[in-house]
Amino acid sequence: MTTTARSKRATTFLRSAACTSSLLLLAATIPSLGGAAAAQNQTTSDLDVIVRSGTVMDGSGSDGYVADVGVADGHIVEVGDLSDRRANTEIDASGLVVAPGFIDVHSHGETDALQQPTSSLTQGVTTEILQPDGGGSTNIPEALAVEEDGLGINIGAYIGFNSVWDEVVGNADRSPTDQEVTQMQDLVVSGLQDGAWGVSSGLQYAPASYASTEEVISVVESAQPWRTNFPNHLRSEENEVVEATEETIEIGEQAGLVPVITHMKVGGPENWGSSEQTVGLIEDANARGTYTAADLYPYLASQTGIQIRVPDWAQEGGRDAMLERFQDPELRAEIAQIIEAEILERANFDGVYFPSKQQNLAEIAEEIGVEPGEAVIRILEDEGNLSAITHFGVEEDLQRIMQNSTTAIASDGGATTSEETHPRRYGSQPRVLGHYVRELDYLTLEDAVRKMTGLPATMIGMVDRGFLAPGMAADITVFDPTTVIDHATFDEPRQFSEGIEHVVVNGELALHDGAATGVQAGEALRRDGSMISRPMTGGDPVRTSARGCLEPVDSNDDGCSAQVVLYASAQGSDSHGRLVVNDKENGTTFRSTELGNVQIADRWASVTGRGTVEGEEAERSFYAILDEEDLLENGRTTFTVQTEDGYALDGVLRRGNSSVDGG
């Protein structure tokens, strides 16, 4: 089931041609692999893949349990005892953990590396969300067009506030006109209509740094009806980190978006320990009803272009204007002093390392006989905005941020083939599982898996990934909890992690016995307007129901093109209920045979499962979304059903009733 973006204003009922007859299933190609971990069955197989006898950690944070996981047509069919079932590919996961594929919500993945992303697969990553920190193309279809060259993992993209501001206002330090604000709002909405998974921002980077808090809100509040998220690189991660955290939460609250403190950290010796305040701000926001989250990579060193240390006023107008200011001796000396002060807020000069030069800033400055600030200016003049790794913090802050319940694990890296990069691109998730879970006991294994799967999925709005349950997309990571560990270092980053044994992407085996298979089963994922950013559903019982007529959103008739009956209840992974959709227009009836994952939020619910079309035996996966206050449809109650083969109904629920209950 490919996540598709549907503009509800333009499209109401969507149906594939196959729906009027037989709703043909899509066939997934599973590679034929030998070895002890994968056995080929010569008998009749009704599944594509079975992962047998592993400890299932389903992404919810619940205790793991031993079970089999069955996959067909790119989706999870069943989780339980499958001893009487056979598959084309069978994986013995005895002694291993079977988890949903890891979702990296902060990726700077290299386009070429996404085709064969061994660096990501060996970390268990099956999905990366691109264009964080406010960057990237404002044309989301263009950003996702890399799919045409083949993808080894799934990708999605944010619409970047910085890019929107740069496209409309440019590099000048000034306030936008009312017309420019409208233009920027339109670009944000267009990005969301095209499937962006949120509005990312990097307020420490020019030209977004020129925008005031109020100006940021005026632009991104256009996304409020989409109920999405606002991941922001803070204006300051050092001396003003507390104030910058407050600002991000304020922007989210005022704009109606979920504020996310992206790659959350505390930099600089004078600020160490401030995570007690910044995490406290997140906890306070959640306590007052503003869902607020964060993501974190498990290293005490960052990586970004060294130009970030140049003051904003010196960057105004772009690179040429900056280089011209460097030619003024007085300005040059002033800028050099500010650069040094900026660096010392975060680290020492020998703590700023340039991978491409294999030297730190102190060594470079000594080699050419100048002060560190002047050395940075010369690097910018001669070699451009070189990437620098900067050591910044202490374990106490990292531990506190990691243990915050709404902090997801991300890499701030993504797919790469580089030998001159940050080790987080090769080791983030295994480092958490091995070093911070097994060795230091910062998290339980179940909670660490949750922070890589269910939590990031719900933060950005996914409904069919992040959990292991019938109807969910078959992204699966199998790892050895006793051996999983990172090997990448700052001196030698291009070292693949150990202990990630098998990875399934959309039902196809992409990593087998720790080695990439070369399969390109990844997809470009697009968010639909009904997929809202939300807190994770807790362990308490949840229920949802809907009954009534489904009509196209733009219809003035009081007829009944389809009838819907839904009842679903769940406690943890134990789900019960039914879904019946009587599509009168096409003369078909779809009935659930099994429910999988049930999630709820405020007046919103989603359900996955398996079902059949009346008169046919073949099952197919589905998800359904009930939205009792759809802001894209003037607050009306809408209902969406989509099956794996493209059959979709999306309309207003009339002449009936619905409910969402978390108690």
Image: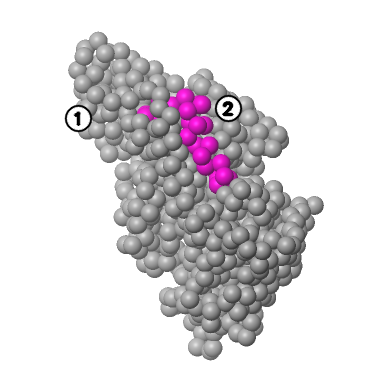
The quadrant in which residue 211 appears is top left
Identify the residue at the far right of this view: 663
In this picture, is 85 found above or below 280? below
Question: Which stretch appears magenta?
Answer: 206-228
Classified by dominant secondary structure, the portion drawn in magenta counts as helix
Q: How far apart are marks 1 and 2 (CA)?
A: 38 Å
User: Who is closer to the viewer here, 237 or 257?
Assistant: 257
Q: Looking at the picture, which amino acid does disc 2 mark?
A: Glu
Q: What element carries label 2?
A: helix
**Residue occupying the point 30% across, 17% down:** 336
Q: Name the residue under label 1.
A: 382
Question: What is the number of the mark on residue 143?
Answer: none
Tags 1 and 2 touching, CB below 8 Å: no
User: Looking at the image, can residue 452 be seen?
Assistant: no
Q: Position of residue 19 (x, y in %)?
A: 53, 77
Identify the residue at the far bottom of this view: 43
Magenta span contains residue 221 = yes
**Residue occupying the point 43% across, 55% down:** 155
